[in-house]
Amino acid sequence: MRFGSPAAHRRAFALAWPLILANVTVPLVGAVDTAVLGHLPEAHFLGAAALGGVIFSLLYYSFAFLRTGTTGPVAQARGAGDFAEVKATLYRALMIALGVGIALIVLQAPIGWIAFRILAGSPEVVDAAKLYFAIRVWGAPAVLANFVLLGWFLGLENARIGLLLQIVINLVNLALCLLFVFGLGMTIEGVAGATAAAEYGGAAVGLAIAARTVARMQGHVDKGRLLDRARILRLVALNRDIFIRTVLVILCFSSFTAVGARFGELTLAANAVLMSFNTFMAFALDGFAQAAETLVGRAIGARDRTELDDCLGATFVLSAAVAVAFTLVYGFGGPLIVAMLTDLPAVREEAFRYLPWAAAMPIVAVWSFQLDGVFWGAARGPDMRNMMLISAACFALAAWIAVPRLGNDGLWLAIYVFLIARAATLGWRLPAVLRSVR
């Protein structure tokens, strides 16, 4: 593998920076809801929005395969010059998103029942959170359509559209929140309605841009190609494998939180503060992983081994440099960051104790991030699923052995084992991806 040509570095960076900014703006929807409700006299509305936000974060993150499962096939079809398939992939993915979104609306009662059985709160908070959930869930088709649109535009190497859509969603959400809450006197229902409407606003803009893009493309999509059983089954299988992989990631990191809670509120709070370091890092590393996804998919579609090696080298070098930068910042500025995140002396002291684990995480996690992007771009669903199954088993085994002996240090060690196992197993399968392009 080369280190990548200057041209490959420029392409990767041009793709990554809009994605990084888009990733950074994603939490702003929840931040706007929190800021608006934080100015109301009743505190339970703020807790309700936080509780509802957790539910939708977990729910929608489980269907993030609609983005990752779209980018790779689109990039490959584009690399092969098959623009009819580029169009057809968009249509198929949107049909799946619409079907899943409608299913979430229809099944909102059992989904809500399960969610509120797991997440507890005061009666006032739970009642308000149920209202928030019942309104915001109607935005599910738009949320999932936005996943598809982001993945499709990314497959076309047009990452700036993803940033534009996120900006539209945030601006519409802000305007409607202010109108509904301060203009019309609504409370939690106004915030939930504004968020759902903002998702539809983003989807409308994205679909309009996609329609113009499709109109300029060559290639005709007839009913036979669109409903081709083999192609639909391949897309469903890829999305299924990515879904399983995503659920396993959620389970591992949720287990980290759950096991950490056994060591008491102080350790739980310290772990939460330090894990926020991982969130900041993920904004950047995800951007380069998604750039790798697009460039790898295009090279595989074009069957160009030179381009594949070039883009692999460029994205790995750039992401490694960013990871080193994060480690240096966390290593030297970690105490200051912890102090900014919490003013509780006991939590700060506990966080300082485990700070080296969080500081070193970027240079350990970067390889799993980048290899995820490579395998998404290559659309290697079974590899992603199977390697994640092995990695999750390694995490469980490491936690079972290390936590009783080392306590919270053992828990951090287990999450390191998980990250290393992800990189090692995908790295083991990487030659198969390279061999597929001669």
Image (cartoon, rainbow, N blue to C red):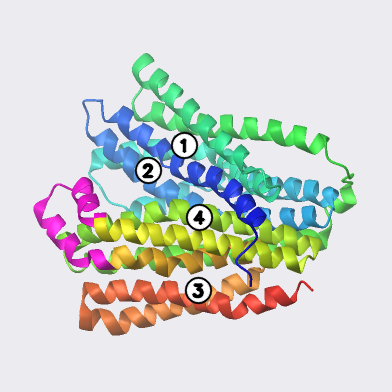
Q: Is residue 309 left or right of residue 426?
A: right
Q: What type is the residue that disc 2 sits on?
A: Gly
Q: Residues within 10 Å of mark 3 (few under 14, many from 20)?
A: many
Percent x, y of residue 247: 49, 64
Percent x, y of residue 189: 39, 29
Between the residue at mark 4 and the residue at mark 3, the CA separation in whole angstroms equals: 15 Å
Residues in magenta? 333-356
Q: Is residue 75 left or right of residue 46?
A: right
Task: Tell whether position 23 is magenta.
Answer: no
Q: In the rendered image, which residue does mark 1 sit on?
A: 136
Q: Considering only order in the chain, which callout, 3 or 1, is on the residue closer to the N terminus? A: 1
Residue 313: quarter of image: bottom right
Q: In the rendered image, which residue does mark 2 sit on?
A: 52
Disc 2 vs disc 1: Cβ atoms closer than 8 Å? yes
Disc 4 vs disc 2: Cβ atoms closer than 8 Å? no
Query: Looking at this view, is 38 or 118 the one in front?
Result: 38
